[in-house]
């Protein structure tokens, strides 16, 4: 496997030279390999929580695919994608939508990329979607969460797929968990970053709460700190002064960890019940500093929620990841690996439908549309948005510290089926929530 | 009444943070007329070095409170090293160039240093919470505050007073003021402007690094922390007046207390407040609140 890594601006010159040479080599090898671009955050604030774990997860799966070493159910699927080795082009997602769109065009038109599996930021996914459709480029989003991709930006996609549930599923699962486990809660408030992800997360949780627990009051002073602000003294004071006992938060990465340090020092977690929608990204790193007793999600059955999934694929993935990176895989690692597995499934299935010959792009797309394939931790059902949007089961639980194992564990875990937390096919998530979540199969 | 006192405390803590991260920027601009974008890197390197030294210190059996020395040592190491290297190695070759070129050069240094930082420390976050845990918490108007954040107010006052006294009450400060007033005449009168520039840049770099080093125990020290600081610092310095230390202090107070009030009363406009104040000040007084009106040389 050839992996080109571009880790920062300082290496731009060297990478540019390598890329120029690599592009030539790539064209020469184009007949024998599948060039898979894997954009992820390698620099900036998104790198530690999502970008680097996602890269690590994708690398492990790509290596195993190329060697034909994937465990069951992929153990008899041969090497590579439909027999061809993956040439992975891992590069940095930092720099914003405009830069990433230019990079996308460059990779497609000059470097002969065959498919993209990547993008973490909802903003980047939103910018890339119309360009991928314009350039007819197979693009799999494994992580980004905004529902707007297929509900507003492109309602009839052909080339773009997303292989995990979107933010609506998170909000619904969280509200259902609260209803089941805190039926007498006296009110709720929130602290979410003031950008697309934070706003969408709060909107969906709030709408779901209004449907499921209509008599529970919501605070009029929910907190909206700037993304990457890192200083939460005033917000923590405001939350501690508020009368609502439940606090919803979709903070992630360094912001989440700073909030936990500052909140712990002031006793916030003793006074309020915190519900963190993506805190799994930090629990292993923080260890005992992670707030035991908080309600946690991982945007699906990933990371710490998959710790005890007893399948050959999951056990192998966790062992290889932990041995190589000295930490268990987190949500982003699972989700990126799941995106690569979607490509593996689609290419192999398309080849088998094509009489064993390497499939065309349209055949790969047809194979993935509406498919159900095995992810690392759970089955993935591509049955929303004309077969381009995935639905998976969801899990929420309470964080605890396992003294015997010396690590964090999830307790009081509740599982929600994909058709319970995701809007039915063809239904807009916000309208579904406002309409009382009709058709939810729980 | 409770809320009012809490707003004041929160506002003072955030103002102190703003002042600590912006004072180095304004010192350098005041003397050298350089808008130093690499200031964000000083902050980030200070935070990383502080986290590293604190981590190393608390792995020893030395007295717990000694860990605070690591914070100041980190600021000194980073400030002196990068101050001298950048000023002597890059900026002195650009003094005769247009100000815009120098801004671009410092921006380039900021980008390079961001990558150098990741080459040294990688992308994993660093934690240094021991000093904050050590100082514990205190109840004020029935609300718990961590003592470490409150000490930031004292540090900002000491730094502000120290710089002000140093500038107005010492011989070195008077030389500095002379250079600020007129670089060419000062040189003609025998002041070694080269040394003044180097020392000023090093002091500014130490201030930037101290901001990061002192904040490190309260945050997750991870890639990108310098970017946010640069934006905030510019806002505060522009409001107070470029190059004015009292201006930075008043600008920080104005922004900090307004932001705390917004968080408590109208949280949805928190993001907007800082830039609204900046826009308002620029509309009324484009040179900032405390920058003296300047006569143009012809």
Image (tube, coloured by chain):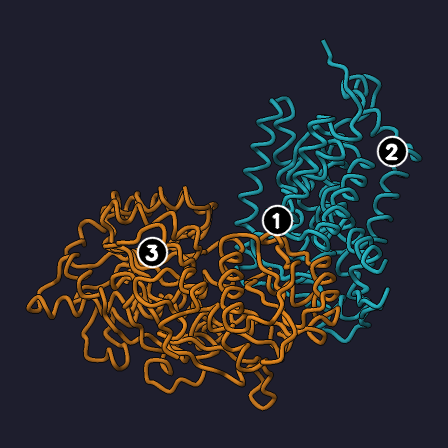
Chain colours: A orange, B cyan
The image shows residue A97 at horizontal and vertical percentages of 42, 45
Q: Which residue is mark 2?
A: B172
Q: Decide: is A358 above or below A195.
A: below
- Residue farthest right in this picture: B169
Task: Verify CB contact (< 8 Å) between mark 3 and mark 2.
Answer: no
Q: Which residue is mark 3?
A: A150
- Residue farthest left in this picture: A355
Task: Verify CB contact (< 8 Å) between mark 1 and mark 2.
Answer: no
User: Which numbered mark, 3 or 2, is in the foreground of this view?
Assistant: 3
Q: Reading the chain from its start, which is encountered first: label 1 or label 2?
A: 2
Let me know if marks 1 and 3 both belong to one chain: no
Tag 2 subunit: B
- Residue farthest bottom in this picture: A404
The image shows residue A387 at horizontal and vertical percentages of 25, 64
Disc 1 secondary structure class: helix
Please indicate whether residue B53 sits to the left or right of residue B149 in the image.
left
Q: Quick one: B203 or A354, which is closer to the camera?
A: A354
Please indicate whether residue B286 sits to the left or right of residue A358 in the image.
right
Q: Visible in this render: residue A426?
A: yes
Q: Quick one: A97 or B264, which is closer to the camera?
A: B264
Disc 2 secondary structure class: helix
Q: Which residue is mark 1?
A: B226
């Amino acid at each position: 496997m050839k992996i080109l890594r571009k880790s920062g601006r300082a290496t731009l010159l060297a990478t540019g030279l390598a890329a120029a040479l690599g592009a030539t080599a790539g064209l020469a090898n184009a007949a024998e390999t599948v060039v898979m671009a894997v954009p992820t955050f390698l620099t900036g604030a998104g790198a530690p929580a999502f970008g680097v774990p996602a890269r690590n997860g994708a690398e492990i799966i790509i290596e195993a695919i190329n060697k034909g070493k994937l465990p069951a159910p992929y153990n008899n699927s041969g090497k590579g994608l439909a027999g061809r080795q993956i040439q992975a082009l891992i590069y940095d997602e930092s720099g914003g939508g405009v830069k990433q769109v230019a990079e996308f065009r460059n990779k497609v038109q000059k470097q002969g990329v065959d498919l993209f599996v990547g993008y973490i930021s909802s903003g980047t996914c939103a910018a890339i979607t119309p360009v991928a459709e314009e350039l007819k480029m197979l693009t799999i989003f494994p992580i980004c969460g905004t529902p707007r991709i297929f509900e507003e930006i492109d309602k009839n996609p052909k080339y773009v797929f997303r292989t995990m549930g979107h933010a609506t599923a998170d909000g619904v699962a969280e509200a259902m968990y609260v209803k089941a486990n805190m039926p007498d809660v006296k009110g709720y408030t929130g602290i979410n970053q003031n950008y697309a992800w934070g706003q969408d997360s709060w909107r969906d949780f709030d709408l779901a709460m209004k449907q499921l627990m209509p008599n529970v009051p919501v605070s009029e002073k929910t907190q909206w700190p700037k993304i990457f602000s890192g200083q939460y003294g005033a917000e923590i004071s405001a939350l501690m002064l508020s009368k609502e006992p439940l606090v919803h938060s979709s903070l992630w990465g360094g912001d989440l960890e700073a909030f936990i340090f500052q909140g712990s020092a002031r006793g916030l977690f003793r006074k309020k019940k915190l519900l963190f929608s993506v805190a799994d990204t930090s629990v292993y790193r923080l260890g005992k500093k992670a707030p035991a007793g908080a309600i946690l999600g991982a945007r699906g059955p990933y990371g710490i929620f998959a710790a005890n999934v007893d399948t050959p694929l999951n056990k192998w993935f966790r062992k290889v990841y932990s041995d190589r990176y000295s930490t268990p895989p987190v949500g982003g690692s699972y989700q990126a690996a799941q995106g690569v597995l979607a490509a593996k499934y689609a290419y192999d299935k398309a080849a088998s439908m094509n009489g064993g010959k390497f499939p065309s792009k349209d055949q790969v797309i047809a194979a993935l549309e509406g498919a159900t394939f095995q992810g690392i931790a759970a089955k993935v059902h591509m049955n929303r948005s004309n077969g381009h949007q995935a639905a998976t089961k969801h899990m929420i639980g309470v964080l605890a510290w396992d003294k015997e194992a010396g690590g964090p564990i999830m307790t009081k875990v509740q599982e929600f089926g994909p058709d319970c937390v995701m809007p039915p096919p063809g239904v807009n998530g916000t309208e579904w929530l406002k309409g009382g979540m009709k058709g939810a199969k729980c | 009444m409770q809320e009012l006192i809490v707003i004041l405390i929160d506002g003072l803590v955030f103002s102190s943070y703003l002042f600590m991260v912006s004072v180095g920027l304004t010192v350098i601009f005041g003397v050298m007329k350089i808008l130093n974008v690499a200031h964000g890197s000083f902050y980030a390197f200070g935070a990383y070095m502080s986290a590293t030294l604190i981590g190393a210190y608390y792995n020893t059996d030395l007295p717990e409170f000694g860990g605070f020395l690591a914070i100041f040592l980190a600021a000194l190491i980073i400030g002196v090293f990068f101050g001298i290297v950048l000023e002597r190695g890059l900026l002195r070759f650009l003094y005769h160039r247009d100000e815009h070129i120098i801004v671009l050069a410092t921006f380039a240094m900021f980008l390079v240093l961001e990558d150098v930082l990741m080459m040294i420390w990688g992308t994993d976050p660093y934690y240094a919470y021991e000093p904050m845990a050590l100082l514990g918490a205190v109840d004020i108007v029935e609300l718990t505050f961590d003592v470490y954040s409150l000490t930031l107010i004292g540090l900002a006052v000491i730094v502000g007073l120290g710089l002000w006294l140093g500038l107005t009450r010492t011989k070195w400060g008077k030389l500095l003021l002379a250079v600020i007033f007129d670089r060419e005449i000062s040189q003609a009168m025998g002041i070694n402007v080269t040394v003044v520039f180097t020392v000023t840049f090093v002091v500014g770099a130490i201030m930037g690094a101290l901001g990061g080093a002192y904040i490190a125990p309260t945050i997750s020290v991870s890639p990108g922390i310098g970017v946010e600081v640069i934006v905030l610092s510019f806002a505060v310095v522009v409001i107070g007046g470029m190059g004015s230390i009292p201006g930075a202090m008043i600008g920080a107070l104005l922004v900090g207390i307004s932001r705390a009030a917004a968080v408590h009363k109208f949280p949805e406009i928190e993001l907007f407040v800082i830039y609204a104040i900046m826009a308002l000040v620029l509309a009324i007084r484009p040179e900032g609140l405390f920058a003296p009106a300047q006569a143009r040389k012809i």
